[in-house]
Image: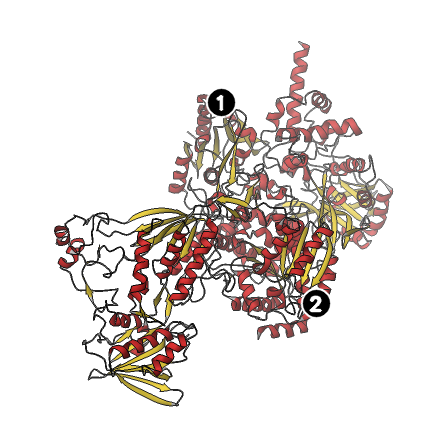
Amino acid sequence: MSIVDSIRADAADLLQTGRAKLVLGYRNRQGRRAPILLTDAAGADQLVYDAECRQNLAAYLRKPEVRQHFPVAVVAAPPAMRSLVMLAAESQIAADSVTVLAVGENEYHGALDLPATAQLLREKYANLALPEELLRRVREIAAMSEEERAAFWTEQFSKCTRCYACRSACPGCYCQWCISKRNVPQWISTADLPHGTYAWNITRAFHHAGRCTLCGACEAACPQGLPLMLLNAHVAECVEKEFGHKTGYDLAEKPLIGSWRTEDDDGFVR
Amino acid sequence: MKLLRADKLAELAAALAAQGYRIVAPIRQGRIVRLAEWHPGATIETSGISTNSVKDFLFPRSEIIDRYSLNGGDFVQQEVAPVGIKTAVLAVRPCDAESVNVLDTVFNWDSNDAFYNARREACTVVSLACVSADQHCFCTSVGGNPGSTEGADVVLRPAGGGEQLILEPLTPKGRALAEAAGGVLSEGEAAADPVAEIPRRFDLKAVREWLAGNFDSPLWQEFASACLGCGACAYACPSCHCFDMQDESNRKESVRYRNWDTCGLALFTLHTSGHNPRSTQMARWRQRVMHKLSYMPQRFNLTACMGCGRCSRLCPNGLAISETCEKIARLCEAKHEGGKR
Amino acid sequence: MARVGVFICHCGENIARTVDVAAAAAAAAKFPGVVYSVDYKYMCSDPGQQLIRKAIADHKLTGAVVAACSPRMHENTFRRAAAAAGMNPYLLEMANVREHCAWVHSDRAAATAKAIDLIRVMVEKVKRNRSLKTITVPVEPTAVVIGGGIAGIQAALDIAAGGKQVVLIEKSPSLGGHMARLSETFPTLDCSQCILTPRMVEAANHPNITLMTSSEVESVGGFVGNFEVTVRRKARYVDPAKCTGCGECWSKCPSKNIPSEFDAGLSRRTAIYRASPQAVPNQPVIDAQHCLMLTKGRCGVCAKVCPRGAINFKDADELVKVKAGAIVLATGFELWDHSAYGEYGAGRIADVIDGFAFERLASASGPTAGEIRRPSDGAEPKTVVFVQCCGSRDEKVGVKYCSKICCMYTAKHAMLYAHKVHGGRAVVFYMDIRSAGKGYDEFVRRAIEKDGAEYIRGRVSKIYRRADGKITVRGTDTLAGMPVTVEADMVVLADAVTPRADAQKLARMLGVAYDADGFFSEAHPKLRPVETAVAGVYLAGACQAPKDIPESVSQASAAAAKVLGLFSKPKLEREPIVSHVNRITCAHCRACINACPYKAIEDFNILDRSGKVLRTVSNVNEGLCQGCGTCVSVCRSKSIDLDGFTDEQVYLQIAALEPVEAGAKTEGSS
Amino acid sequence: MEKTETITENARTGFEPHIIAFVCNWCTYAGADLAGTSRLQYAPNVRIIKLPCTGRIDPLLVLKAFQGGADAVLVSGCHPGDCHYTSGNYHARRRWSVFGKLLAFAGIDGRRLYFSWVSAAEGQKFADLINSITKEVHAAGPFDRINPARRRA
């Protein structure tokens, strides 16, 4: 049975048996993939799956309209699976509220609960490689002078319209009150000028330090084509190198920022 | 008629720049095409449609509209003069040109917005008729068409199978631009290429009627189910025009910014009390559709959707106002037929 | 609109010399929100405080900034003044223009500019200060005293006498510490044990004192008024409830050849032993390293001979939790190890001993019953060289400070030697003689003039043993300006007094600071010498700095007074610098709960009327929160904030420092 | 002495680095006090903002400082193991390790952002630190022109 057929079958079964009241999957829309929220088994045949499915559907779990339908099932590739595990570790979803329709690299692992998903990730997807091109560009920028880097990012951020598509596409951005909404004090200016866009994009990247699963949804969502994954990949590399930290593999994971070890890097401190 | 070789757009830009115009045109930036300030060397993309619209140059994402200096305990207000830089916006789509009418109306209906008007008066819109379209285009469904000259000061029409462009000034500003273009243009005759075929996707009248009577329809939940509540659609939309005011200060002065805002974000309608009249994404998405297709027509007899399709092209989650309208239209037909029987 | 008053202190000349205080006052007067600005010679003086109180009343101030010394110096002074004028004390802040400005800069213009900035920063903060109410927490009226030497005993007895409970924790099997090992004490030469032993017994029997010997502090939790101290009571293998201290066991114990710690290795003890005949409690313990039963599993003689069946080889360490309102640190000192001095024989010459060894030789209860006999062959040394400052005042190899007590005990040693070995020759090498103290200098003079100790000013450069057993001591007489060589039979080194090796571990458990030398730091060198920076933790004795007995005892009593003061009220008032959660915006990611060092943040369920859980959020327990603010930094949605250092306050403080001339003007539009 | 050098350099270039220091109350603030009571002279370019603990020093504070035109920012607290609140500085250290690298990648590098441990006993270290940082920022030059976070209105 093809991956798509298996997903359809499991989705229909989960909805019929009531083990899921809602299935988050992908559909076809004018030749592109779009999320679909199914509550009726009859609709299962609308589900599709292929490499084009780039949205991280775990992002929907913050929507009150979706949470009303717990337990839900989510079609998820390894990065999205990591997001789900991370959300559970950060107490955003209860382990019994989500079933994962786990799609691996061209194979389907079936309908798993979160512990099984975490185990699958540890066993089969412990090392998800990032695109060479992305890593190459990260090196490229790291090799620039401070002035060049500043110029590069100033140029990039100047395109940002502060539409927050990056935020809404990201499962990790579940705060009802994002820092960007805070106005007493207004740490992050809403003005779409360098100080505002720099503060927003840097803070976004930092808030995902040790939490980003590198799914790429933010960059894919950005209407202005900002290379957000450069920031995410750089930070992810740093935290893995410095602290051996990779999020989304352990339901009991402690947050990277908010825990410590005596042997943490001390070299940069005078 | 005035003609321009299609591959000489850059020369037109250069000529106008020489005459003191700031040139804005669709330019490729990485994986996207944006309307941006043109500089010699940049190639102007005439196919497809830019991610941003003319709006960016008439109603910027952020602008300072007031300024106070601090002197000890007291504020001293500083005049902020509206600035309009003489600008020619080249080769924008007819739907974009049309959208300017909406902005003109909104920024002048109760009071006249000096900042907007200064830019508007200094701006000459040169539209480029569409000979092709993609599956997201639906101008014909909302009263526009790929050859429309609404809101344009100058229209460019592809001719001779795209070899040539026919340049037709439509307004005094347009004629002034043609003057400034001077030698780049040649006199001659050419037959305009046929404009793009864009099928009508729904009956706008029927949709309006449905909207007027179905504020509380359970269908909205379904329409909006995939919306995650960002502002991508509104900020790309040529006619969305909502803004927010923010004061920022250092110890010398305080400035008042006018920044884009959108009904798609939860904070937009949040009251100080904590109450939010549009507490769900459903309500916010409904507001967006209603505002464009029901409230604006009622108030100004204007459709605030140009059918440019930007929102559905950009929406990370595949929402599209056109798709919603099609669904509504189908409902109406069904009801209609049901009524017949 | 805020009404802030700014009060700039000259501190006599201290601030005014470098900072143009008048100019600063004039500048401050122009800050938005400042309605009154003044400079004055001594703000902390009575008239100075009067001035503040009057201004608060006259100008209806909503906040005040005192630009003067460090807040560590006078914040309380000025906040009390504000309170006296009816202003909430937390509406007053200090700008540190003395330590952080006037004293560290010489360029008057630059210093004045900086002072003005520092004042503006605090004005901006004060504008957003809220009135805070001090938090009251219940106090557990029990004190833990760590260390059973004279300082610990004294502190424990004084607290107990004040009617409060004390848990006295001693690492070794017996109370008494170093003092119990001394022969006589300067300057009166009264027998150390004769004066100490009664105090030891009193401490052991006092109804308000719980004695825990062979015990060490494992961990410390909680905070002032509510500490929880976990104590490891080490296995002693002898049931104290049954043992009568009859001595059958140790007289029969086969492993007899263990060097006695108490006697500085000059005598041997058995595996089951008492530290000394005067040990308190007077009950033996088994030394597991040397007990045949515990090491090899055979023997068990003591168990056989014990008439009460008190021996229990199965005994194990146990962890005991003690709730306490205050902690007194009295962990004492140890001697610097002179084996670091190669030129002094690197500790390998048997007859080159330290002060404690000599104390034991001179002690009637010692291994030689008070006769001076050298360790190597038990012969009576005819010539003894005493070397002061061994390791002290030697930054390279030893310690840089003066160990304070060596001059006095060396004089005592010379004196005791003269009394015990008639015709013996005592030579003392010294750098300086520091004998300040009641009857101290007279005591040293007596050693020199009456008891004929030869004092040579100069350092000893080399000590080595000759083939014939004599010890050659080479040095210089810096007064005579010539080299000196003394042929000695025994050498006594006055080793430096150092903090205990494990003192820093304890300091970290408690969050108590320690100085560069490793001694515990007092809260203020002059005004708060027995307190630490950690509320509810006090210092007594040589763990803070080298001290002699009377000093240790008086500090111990002072610490006891502090503890009794703390215990005098059933509830304790605490600075209200605590975090608060914004329950509307908290996303319950639990980052703060993970990060809090005090486990002060917990889950909190928001219920509807029917009791159904609507949302779960974080909640701060004010009693446990110590106000570090770590939670604020890990909160991504800024749903937790810290009173006294709120986001808004800090934001405005930073904004107040923006250089206004910088920052190119650009039109806001694109 | 370093400070005098700094001053002569300043005289030449006319550039006075504007440095904001976020320090903890228990160690570095007290260390700065000790520098004062010991009358140690150091460059007058640093403005201290006191917080209870490095644990409280949020990256947003640093961003705000740079928005406000700081040429450099110093964050300083208790040595590892010495935190008055037992572990605030450990939390801070990890946070800064990550945030520092992120900022460097985004155009605000190590010549603009400094971290240090200065205990209550290290008045001399504090004075030396301020002098050397002031010198280094001096060498790096004014940040305002290229500062990507700078607010320009």
Between C186 and C221, the residue placed more toward the observer is C186
Graded by Cα atoms within 10 Å as few (under 14), some (14 to 19) or many (20 or more), the crowding at tag 1 reads: many
Q: Secondary structure at mark 2?
A: loop
Q: CA distance from mark 1 to mark 2?
A: 81 Å
Q: Secondary structure at mark 1?
A: helix
Could you tell me the amino acid type at mark 1?
Ala
Q: Which residue is mark 1?
A: A41
Is residue B301 rendered to the left or right of residue A141?
right
Is residue C522 rendered to the left or right of residue C447?
right
Could you tell me the amino acid type at mark 2?
Asp
Task: Give x and y (percent) for residue D115.
Answer: 53, 60
- The residue shown at (72%, 61%) is C25
| Placement of C126 over or under B196, stated as above or below | below
* Res. A4 mark: none
Q: Is residue C511 visible?
A: no
Q: Which residue is mark 2?
A: C20
Write down the chain letter for disc 1: A
Task: Give x and y (percent) for residue B291.
Answer: 72, 30
Between B314 and D111, the residue placed more toward the observer is D111
The part of the image, by quadrant, that contains residue C181 is: bottom left
Graded by Cα atoms within 10 Å as few (under 14), some (14 to 19) or many (20 or more), the crowding at tag 2 reads: some
Between B91 and A109, the residue placed more toward the observer is A109
Q: Is residue C311 visible?
A: yes
Task: Give x and y (percent) for residue A127.
Answer: 42, 46
